[in-house]
Amino acid sequence: MSVRVIYKLCIFIASAFAFCNAADYPDEKSDDDPIFAYFCFYKDSISWIHGEDSVYVLTFHEMKNEITFSINFKSTTDISSFWVSLPDLDRNKIIINPFRGTQGRGSGFYRGRKYSENRTVTPYDLIDFYILQKDSLLVKSLLGTTNRLKWDYDLKMGKQKQEFSGDNIIYISGFCTEEQLKAIRERKKKKE
């Protein structure tokens, strides 16, 4: 009788062990989700693209990971520029504002004096993509997709150059909801 009890106990323990290992536990690496930011489209009027009244704007509505960096420097001149792209998509149909994030100062150059500056940059606040209305099929094809996003921030101080860059995965959820639009407008108002 004791052999039967031990046999049944072994079967029970083995079954319990097998079921426990087969249970659907969250993966320990679930924090390593590759999505860096969530984007959505909204329609907006625009004045700087010749011949266009309105476009589809693709911008982020939620950041999974925040990125901001500060640069402290002394120089007689400085020029900064920002470039962003979705490298796996048709670059001819996705427009960026080439003046976004561009700034410079050169007054110290003429006087021969260095000036100090502390500049804080949040790259994703500089990112907006514009797609013309005639390319609405491209907008439709991007809904619910993940895409690579690459950005570069360059700071030139005289002959010296500093470069910051990112290569991230974004998710384009679709058209912005009213709640997302409200958050986007508030964020843009703070940055102006």
Image (cartoon, rainbow, N blue to C red):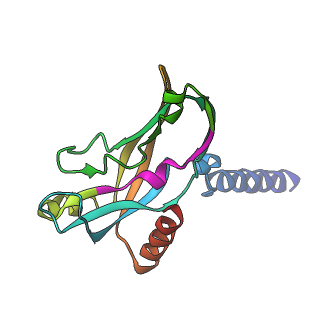
State the residue in front, 43 or 104: 104
Task: Name, please, the residue furthest toward the top.
Answer: 159
Q: Which residue is drawn at 58% across and 52% down?
A: 66
Task: Name, please, the residue furthest toward the bottom.
Answer: 178
State the residue in front, 3 or 107: 107
Q: In this view, does 27 lie to the left or right of 43?
A: right
Q: Position of residue 96 (x, y in %)?
A: 29, 50
Q: Which residue is drawn at 49% across and 33% down?
A: 78
Q: Is residue 1 magenta?
A: no
Q: Position of residue 10 (x, y in %)?
A: 77, 50
Q: Is residue 124 magenta?
A: yes
State the residue in front, 77 or 42: 77
Q: Is residue 69 left or right of residue 79?
A: right
Q: How many labels does the image show?
A: 0
Task: Name, please, the residue furthest toward the front.
Answer: 111
Q: Is residue 102 left or right of residue 187?
A: left
Q: Which residue is drawn at 32% across and 44% down?
A: 86
Q: Can residue 100 be seen in this view?
A: yes
Give the position of the N terminus as an image quadrant. Answer: bottom right
Q: In this view, does 32 lie to the left or right of 40?
A: right
Where 106 falls versus 17 (above or below)?
Answer: above
Q: Which residue is drawn at 30% across and 63% down?
A: 57
Q: Where is residue 11 in the image (x, y as percent from the top left)?
A: 72, 53
Start and end of the magenta stretch? Answer: 117-129
Where 87 falls versus 130 (above or below)?
Answer: above
Q: Where is residue 116 in the image (x, y as percent from the top left)?
A: 64, 36
